[in-house]
Image (cartoon, helix red, strand yellow):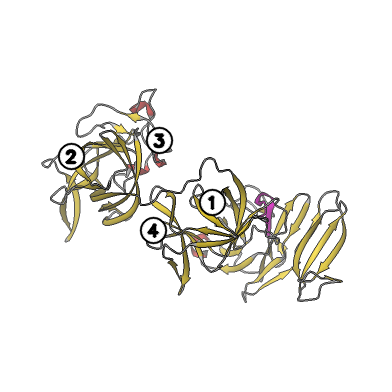
Amino acid sequence: MKKNLLFVLLVSASSLASSAQSTLTEENLTVPAPIGHTSSTSTRTGQILDIITSASGETVLFNKSCEGYFRSYTGKYTPYSDAEIPATVVMDDDDVYFLNILSKGLTDTYVKGHKEGNKITVNLPQTVLYNEREKDGYNIDRLKPTEVVSNGETTVTYTIDREGPQYATFTVSEDGTITLDDMGDGCGLGMVFISDDAWNGYVDFKQEYKPLDRPIVEKPASVETQEWVIAYDGTGYHVNVGFDEDEVYIGGMCGNLRSAYFKGRIEGDKVIVPNKQLVGIYSQTYFVYLMAGRVEENKITLSPEEVDFVMHYDSETKLLKPVDPEQLLIFNAAPDRVLVLQTFNDFTIKYQTNSAGIPQNPFNLLYSTDNFEWYGFYSFIFDIPSLGTNGNLLDTQYLYYNILMDGEVMEFTPDDYDVSETMTDIPYLFNNGFDIYSYGGPRRELGIYAESGFDTLGVKLFYNYDGLLTSSATATLDIATGNVTYEDASSVTALNSRTVVAREYYDMSGCRITAPQTGNLYIERVIFSDGSSVTVKNIKR
């Protein structure tokens, strides 16, 4: 089987372009509009034609749907039908340029057509990729289906149709929709190898480009933003919030698309976020919508478009919070079906002046034997929040944690773990991708190579910030029972010249008490010699 050149480094500049021209690289293979234009002489088979890597003119974004065949990861040719695909078309007077004309064969290059009246004609073949090292590349050409029988099984392959028209046509309707005309006899637009014209596994026999029914939300350049914090489920990160009279723009909330903004309108002490906002494009593959929804019968459902997402807004404390904590704010990769990238509910977005705080306790402790057969270790799984007990987002570069086995702090050595040096303090963001693994949020998974000889595993989180070392309680998992206990309540230790001069205790109603009672939740205020203080919420064990 031939190599799929879409996954091979592209041609070098010396082979395709003069010194004044840019060329295809692995980097610009992933950007929507790579720059430069490369060319060489050609024949129909065996040499490359002009490769168009940039186009000037009016860039128009379409909502594309298509049908065709592609080669799946199993090597089989599989029929597919896709909709809601972002598609870029550049209009330059009567010249029309289609970026990534085959939705399953992304090369980040253009195919050129010419428009006369309501028809666009694309002459074939056209080269979209060449790899100098492999001495091969891809052409877009007119392909016809051919049935192949092997071992009693009939499959479909495609070959170049040299007898039919050596072009494809598109019709442009009055509303701007561009439709691939029927190519006849089951023919379609497909990719073939330059070296021998063999089909590479991608062909479209139907394509339709519809104009977008709404624009992508963009924050006006004149709107300045502040760095706020979104907090939810024990974790959080920074987002950008900007105000433009009675409108608010919030960006960076979608972890898969941090550049995306959505907007709301301020009505008194509420912010109304309109449903079904188009906020961006994810990985050149999906439109991303900001939508409202709910969980019904353990399934996420999308709310009707007229149902807005509503947040409380406190302009004095600079805080946003959902009115209904059960309502979902969803970043969804489709307008009318559930294709979730990220969901939020019962969150807060607030302006934070500093990162002081005390780590919350680890939670969701679990011991699993599932990975032993595959990786040779058992798994200690747990969540360590990046939020403090005061709700502040802690600065993760100053957070670290210890793992305890039967109450003793574990040591991680290069002999046993995939680490460069021995350590006991594991930085919050550390991830070796194997036996000390971070899932990108609070969830961690740690490999335990010992099969027996211990009864408990524990985790304790520390925060070394602004001269103070604060810590969570130690969360301890009993391996046999699965029970979790918390010991050594959150603490504060001065690391500089400040000393602790007093400790005050309060009940949850704010009344001062002499000392906390066992089993009761209480507030401890630690006062230092320089007059500063920090407040800790604890439970007396």
Q: Nearer the viewer, residue 387 or 399?
A: 387
* Image mark for residue 247: 1
Question: For numbered disc 3, what is the local secondary structure?
Answer: loop
**Badge 4 or badge 2: first in the primary sequence:** 2
Identify the element where label 4 is drawn: loop
- Cα separation between marks 4 and 2: 34 Å
Identify the mark at residue 335; answer none if there is no mark: 4
Question: Residue at 36% across / 39% down in the picture?
Answer: 59
Pointer 3: what residue?
25
Front in this rendered view, residue 447 or 335: 335
Q: Nearer the viewer, mark 1 or mark 2?
A: 1
Q: Is residue 166 magenta?
A: no
Q: Which residue is mark 2?
A: 167
Would residue 12 be seen by someone viewing this image from the given angle? yes
* 71 w.r.t. 491: above or below: above
Q: Residue at x 21, y 45 (%)?
A: 171
Give the secondary structure at mark 2: strand
As measured in the structure, the alpha-carbon distance from the residue carrying label 1 to the one carrying label 2 is 49 Å
The three-letter amino acid code for the residue at tag 1 is: Glu
Q: Closer to the observer: label 3 or label 1?
A: 1
Which amino acid is tagged 4? Pro
